[in-house]
Image (tube, rainbow, N blue to C red):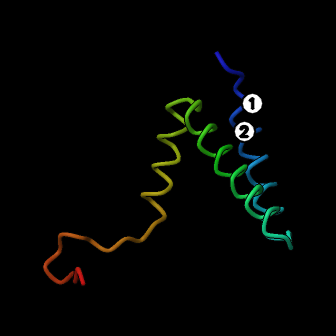
Amino acid sequence: MTLPLFPVLLLVVAMINIVWYQRASHELSKVMAAGGAIVCLVWGFAIAHWSILLLGLFFLLKFRSMPLIFSPSASRY
């Protein structure tokens, strides 16, 4: 069983990598920061408890205004 703080730690490391990506001037530093952020986010979501994942899904569905795909007035092209 993983520590409950470990997914939060991975999220913090991912956010630090994103800030590092925005401030980096060299291409290699940007690639390393983006790669580290992606790995931390994927790993953090993979080991997170299912209730945390459902809470995140709830917030995405509640606060995201998304047009209906299957409505007759929606254009696909």
Residue in view at x 65 percent, y 44 percent: 39
Residue in view at x 77 percent, y 64 percent: 30
**Outermost residue, top side:** 1
Q: Which residue is mark 2?
A: 8
Q: Name which residue type carries label 1.
A: Leu
Q: Quadrant of the N terminus?
A: top right
> Quarter of the image holding residue 9?
top right
Q: Position of residue 55 (x, y in %)?
A: 51, 43
**Tag 2–tag 1 contact (CB < 8 Å):** yes
> Quarter of the image holding residue 24?
bottom right
**11 or 34, nearer to the observer:** 34
Please tell me whether residue 45 is drawn above or below residue 77 in the rendered image. above
Q: CA distance from mark 2 to mark 1?
A: 5 Å
Q: Position of residue 57 (x, y in %)?
A: 46, 49
Q: Name which residue type carries label 2.
A: Val
The answer to whether 70 appears left or right of 51 in the picture is left
**48 or 62, nearer to the observer:** 48
The answer to whether 44 appears left or right of 19 in the picture is left
**SS at circle 2:** helix
Q: Position of residue 21 (x, y in %)?
A: 78, 64
Please tell me whether residue 75 is drawn above or below residue 53 in the rendered image. below
Residue in view at x 73 percent, y 40 percent: 10
Q: Quadrant of the C terminus?
A: bottom left
**Outermost residue, front side:** 28
Q: Which residue is mark 1?
A: 5
